[in-house]
Image (cartoon, helix red, strand yellow):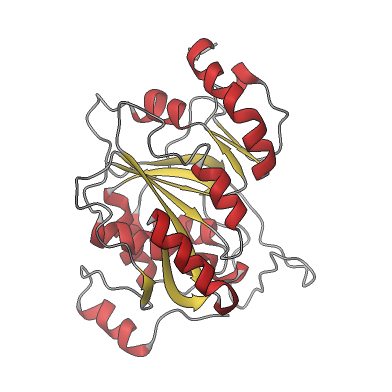
Amino acid sequence: MHDWRTQDEQLYSRVHQRTIIPLYPYLIEEDSKCRSGAPFLLLLIPSAPQDFYTRKALRNTWANESLVNSVHIIRLFLLGRSKSHEEKVIQESDIFHDIIIQDFVDSYYNLTIKTMMGMEWVSRLCPNVKYVMKIDSDMFFNPWFLVEKILQPKSVPKKNFITGMIVQNALPHRDKGSKWFMSTKIYSKKFYPLYCSGTGYVFSGDLAKEIYLAALELQTFPFEDVFVGMCLQKLGVKIFEPTEKWFIGEKVNYDRCKFAKLVTVHHFTPKELLQIWPEFMVAVETCDTKDN
């Protein structure tokens, strides 16, 4: 299991518990992204270096920063190191300035490190952001419904707030053949703590620093959404339970007015997103999004 902290970093975190430092050097940092003003919503999107087409599709659909006219939204794709794609990713970054990379190997089992990179970046370089949405790249996402129904820009910004598709009483996989295998040596409890599915969850900007600092005091864990749940448990932060099923964890056939009243739906390919998006933008304007 990868231990993401050197001895010096562990000592530093104990002595300077409120200090924010990167766990790995940045290869691309985009440290000026928030200098023009704190955004209302920041999208953190884990991405594999080779997924050029996916990032292009997201920029042209739900990760378009100008979609919601009433608020300032920015996006960041979170990547690890990949020598075979480095040159092309740098060229992409030079055009869009929406990619950050730290010097760790990009892999499935380093998703926790990738997510914590996002938390650290927000804490240090965009601390006044109102809300952060961590969302996977294989999702349908409705930013209008999230902003207008849940976050409500005209309301006082929430603090210590996080919500998404809540997972409770989840059992660790003990089958060694499972992609999600977890040994009792690493995690001996019967259930994982309450957590939000990593497919998509939104939290108040103040929590980024708290989660990151809590993470420094915990043993590393390969499943990022469970690990964030551990951090929330350590912090004593309660997950807000949605009043409706706004976050869908499985594939659902596209329905224009149904999707207008959702935040996320899982398992959408870039091709599918591009196909439905023009029609969905019309649905946003024409469908009734009031509660049933």
Q: Is residue 247 visible?
A: yes
Q: Is residue 198 visible?
A: no
Q: Nearer the viewer, residue 153 or 198?
A: 153
Q: Is residue 191 left or right of residue 23?
A: right
When the figure is inspected, residue 90 is found, relative to residue 130, above or below; the finding is below
Residue 135 at x, y percent in the picture: 51, 47
Number of marks: 0
Residue 113 at x, y percent in the picture: 47, 69
Q: Nearer the viewer, residue 66 or 149?
A: 66
When the figure is inspected, residue 69 is found, relative to residue 97, above or below; the finding is above
Q: Is residue 180 left or right of residue 28?
A: right
Q: Is residue 114 left or right of residue 23?
A: right
Residue 286 at x, y percent in the picture: 52, 10
Q: Which residue is depicted at the point 46% across and 65% down? A: 91
Q: Quadrant of the C terminus?
A: top right
Q: Residue furthest bottom?
A: 7
Residue 180 at x, y percent in the picture: 69, 64
